[in-house]
Amino acid sequence: MSRSRPPTKTYAAPAIEKAFQIIDLLAEYPQGALVKDMAAHLGRSVGELFRMVVVLEQNGYLNRSPITDRYTVSYKILELAFRATPARNLVRTATPWMRRLVEEVEQSCHLVVPNGAHGLVVAREENPGTRGFALRQGAPIDMIRSCSGQVILAFSPPDVSDRLVREAEAVREEPVDRDWLAGRLETIRARGFDQRKSPITFGVTDISYPIHAFDRELIGALTVPFMELIDGSQRIKLDAVAERLHATARAISSELGCPKD
C-alpha cells in the first residue's frame, strides 16, 4: 500500500520533501529497502527516487548493503540528532557513566554500535591521567576480529549476526571461517563478555560488555582497551577494571530500560 503524499503547502521544495520521505520511510525498515520498494511505498516512480537515494548515500545519510542492495539510514542521522537535540539517547545516557568509569579505573573506554560491515565508535572517554590509549570517535571497527565486534555478533539475534558477517565478508572480499567464529561467539555468550589480548596493539587487553535496551535488544558494546604499565605505577588491576566495566554496562542498560535479571 502506497503512502499518501503530504497536502499541498504554500511553500514547496520537492527535492527536500523527497529526501525526508525516504529517510522517514527507511526509519521503519531497519533491515533496509530497495529503491523499487521505496517507490511503491511512497507512490513515486523509481526514476523519481533513484538520483535522490544515490545523493543521500554519497553524502553519508544512507548506507547500501553490498549484498542485498538495500538501503538503510546511516548513523550520520544519529550524529546530527545527538548534536542538535536534547533528547535522551544512547550516547547521552552512556556518557556520564563512561566518564565515571574512566575516573575510577584510570583507563579509556569507547562505545561501539553495529554499522553495516563495520562497528562504529559513537562515543569515547579518555583516561584523565597522564597516560592512555583511546580510539577516536567515528573510527570503524572490524566486526570479525575485534573484541567489540565479536561481542556485538555474539549477543545480536542470529539473523542479524549472520547478516553482519555476510556484509563484512563482502567488504573483506574473502570468506570468514564460520566454525572458528561460531566457537568464539559461543565462548563469549557463555562468559557474558569478552576479554583478550588486542589483535592489533601490544600491551593492550580489550575487555568488552554488551549494552542492551528495554526489550533486551543488543544496541552496542562498551569496551575498555586496558593498557598495561611496566613501571609498577598501575593502581587498578585488570580484574578490577573488568568488574567496574561490567557494572557500568549494566547501569547503562538499566537506564535504557533493559529489565534487570
Image (cartoon, rainbow, N blue to C red):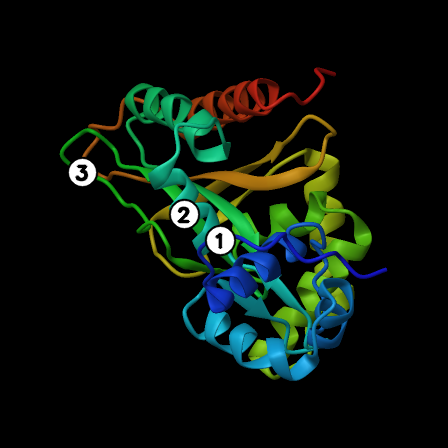
Viewer can see residue 118:
no
Q: Which one is earlier in the sequence, the residue at label 1 or at label 3?
A: 1
User: Residue at coordinates 65% horizontally, 57% vertically from top-left?
Assistant: 26
Expressed as whole percent of the image width and height from the top left, the position of residue 177 reads 71, 71
Number of disc labels: 3
Cβ atoms at labels 1 and 2 below 8 Å apart:
yes
The quarter of the image holding the C terminus is: top right
Expressed as whole percent of the image width and height from the top left, the position of residue 109 reads 38, 37
Expressed as whole percent of the image width and height from the top left, the position of residue 48 reads 61, 79
Quick one: which residue is furthest to the right in this view?
A: 1
Q: Nearer the viewer, residue 52 or 149?
A: 52
Q: Which label number is shown at residue 18?
A: none
Q: Which label number is shown at residue 75?
A: 1
Indicate the amino acid at tag 2. Answer: Glu
Indicate the amino acid at tag 3. Answer: Arg
Q: Which one is earlier in the sequence, the residue at label 2 or at label 3?
A: 2
Q: Nearer the viewer, mark 2 or mark 3?
A: 2
Q: Which residue is mark 3?
A: 131
Q: Which residue is mark 2?
A: 79
